Every structure is written in C-alpha cells, then in structure tokens.
Amino acid sequence: MKKTYLLPLLLVFALTIASCTGNDESEYEPVSPVVLDVTQVPYPKLSDYKFFVGEMKNLEPAYRVIPFKPASELFSDYAHKKRFVWMPEGVSATYDGDDNVLNFPVGAVMIKTFYYTDVLPNHTQRIIETRLLVKTTEEIHAGEGTPNSGWKYYDYIWNEDQTEAYLETSGNGTFIPISFVEEGETITTTYKTPANTECATCHKINRNLTGEIVIPIGVKPQNLNNVFDYGNSQRNQLQKWQSVGYLDNSVPGTINSTVDWTDTSKPLALRARSYIDVNCAHCHREGGHCDYVAMRFNFSNPDLTSFGVCMTPLFNVGPDYNYVINAGHFNTSELGFRITTNQPSQMMPIIGRTVIHEQGVEVIKDWINSMENTCD
C-alpha cells in the first residue's frame, strides 16, 4: 500500500514546487534598494540613501549603483576616489557634445568618495568625505525664470570609526589634518572639504551668458569613452551606461576623447592636454569661473594659441613669465609657475589642493619643453 500511494504523492509535490518556482522566476525583477526623494534631500546620514550594501566603508555598490571613472582624474592632494552614478527606473541621460556634461534626468545622483589608503601611523585606509550631486528638478532656462540646472550638492563627512558619514551643515567645509604615504613618500597636509562657495566655483557654468547654473564636471562623453573594469567584466563605460538604461542612443559612434595622463603609451601632448582639461578646463572655458581670462583649456580646443601657447598673461607673476605657455621653456611659462607654487593667490588650481602634484607637473613640463617652435 505504501508503494501504491507514495509515487503519485511525490509526483504531485514535485509538480507543485516546479510550478511555484517557475512563477517566481518569471515574475521576479531586481529592485534597487536606493532611497531617494528629491523633495526630501539632503538626508542627515549617507546610509539613509542605501547606496552601498554590507559594511558601508567597503563602498560596495547596491543594485543599479554603477561605478565609473573618467579617463584622467582631478588631482586632490593625492586622495583616491571612487565614483558612482544612480538613476531612477525608466529615465536616461542624453548626449550634448563630446566635452559637455551629459543631460541628466531628475533623480540622477553622482556619488564621489575621497579616501587615502596608507594613512599614518598605522598604514590604514581612511575615508574622508562623500560628495553628492543630486538632480532635484528640471532645468530652468533664462527667460523662464532664474536659471537653475536642478543640481544640488551635499557633502557627508565620515566618522573616525568609518561606520557612517554625516551631512556637513555649516556650509564652510572642514579641515582634517592627515599624514599618509604616497609612492614611498610621506606627505603631511590639512585636507580641506569644500565650502559651498568652493563647490560653486568649480561646478558652475554660465552658458551663453544667460546666468550661472551648477553642473557636474567629469561626466562627459570625452571622459567616459574608455574601458572600465567592473570586476566581473570589462566594458566601455558609455556602452555600459546604455546597457543598464542610464544613457540613450543619442551618443555618436566617434568621440574626441581624453586619455589617461598616466598612460605612457599615449602621445605626450594628449596626456598633457587631458591632465590640463580635467584639472583646469572647468574654469578656463566659455562660461567657466575664469571665462574672463583668454585661455581655453578644454580638450576639444584645437587652437594652441587660445590654449595659451605664446599668449601674453593677463596677470604679471614675475618679469621672466612673458607667456602663459612659453613654447620650449617650462621654467618661464606662467602655467609652470602656477602649478609649482602653493601661494594661495598665485597657484593653480586656485582651490582643491594644498600640495604640489609632482607627477602631474612632470608631464606638463615634458610637454612644454618638447615644443619645437619657440615664442620669441
């Protein structure tokens, strides 16, 4: 009797399980755990957004929080950076030119964390801050009201235990003494998280002289048209964004792209111009903070004269510096002077660093000294 009834019973049970399992698999769709209400930001703690899973200090991105990296990175006192982007379901960014920031939809978030990997005295990692740029509203153009891009910036400062980051509410930034080892050299400085006015200095643009708006800096097709290692795959970043729905199909097949300035296999001029673009062009371009100065340092500018070669400086930094870039002579170029000084009134960039970037200086020096046609 047991054999007579056992087989049909097992068959019914198996069919029931298979039916339930099949339905679950066909109906299940992953959902991003990110919590973002653009009418409620900023939240008091970084963890409130749920951008990361597991221990927050590991910066392990949640579902649909996508890591990215521009071809060349902005120098910030040797801080390492991890960048991520997140967007709500059903919306995408659109193309607006090779060297213009992508047009992002409401709800998009840029997440950028600054950290050091060899901090003294214990040679440990320390995360300093996580900056957010959140697209809270549609852009308002001139003629329709006060110009507004819809982007808002918020800064979260990590605690000593590296368990949480809290919203910086003073608007003045913070000063954090730090000593660390970089390429075998011990560096001691006071790291400065940005004040609101400093954020605005770098992240603003005045398009067509219709009013200043806040925008991201590095998320341009020219900077993302390269391969990124996602851990389980390597893929062109623009293609990756398209595959997850973060970017539509308006991006052209050919893009005038920057390169990794540290990649010695690339031509020296491209490396130097890529470095200058990411560190200087957000100010020294049409509508940037330093629009009043004649130099145009954006990578897409093909004219070396307006790039500063043999250009007379607007400001006199000394009797030996007669040109912004003195072709063949780094040591008598205004650009060379400004990137090798820490004097606040004379250094370049004017904010964002407290130490000289020795490796970056060498690339610019080699490029200027390699120029064959002199200015005199």
Image (spheres, rainbow, N blue to C red):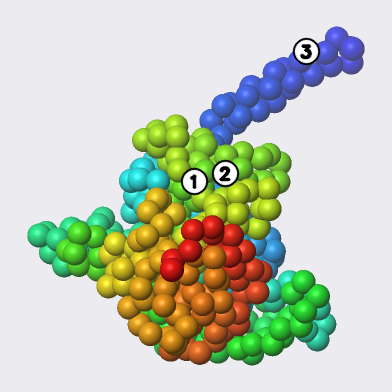
Instruction: Say which residue label 2 marks.
Output: 226
Front residue of 4/44: it is: 44
Q: Are marks 2 and 1 in contact (CB under 8 Å)?
A: yes
- Looking at the rendered structure, which numbered label has been put on residue 13? none
Disc sitting over residue 257 in the figure: 1
Residue 153 sits above or below residue 87 on the image = below
Classed neighbour count for the residue bearing mark 1: other residues with Cα under 10 Å, few (<14), some (14–19), many (≥20): some
Q: Residues within 10 Å of mark 2 (few under 14, many from 20)?
A: some
Task: In this rendered view, identify the residue nearer to me: 145 or 277.
Answer: 277
Q: Nearer the viewer, mark 1 or mark 3?
A: 1
Closer to the observer: label 2 or label 1? 1
Residue 144 at x, y = what percent? 11, 59
Dot 1: element: loop
Q: Earlier in the sequence, mark 2 or mark 1?
A: 2
Q: CA distance from mark 3 to mark 2?
A: 59 Å
In terms of secondary structure, where does tag 2 sit?
loop
Does 297 appear above or below 314? above
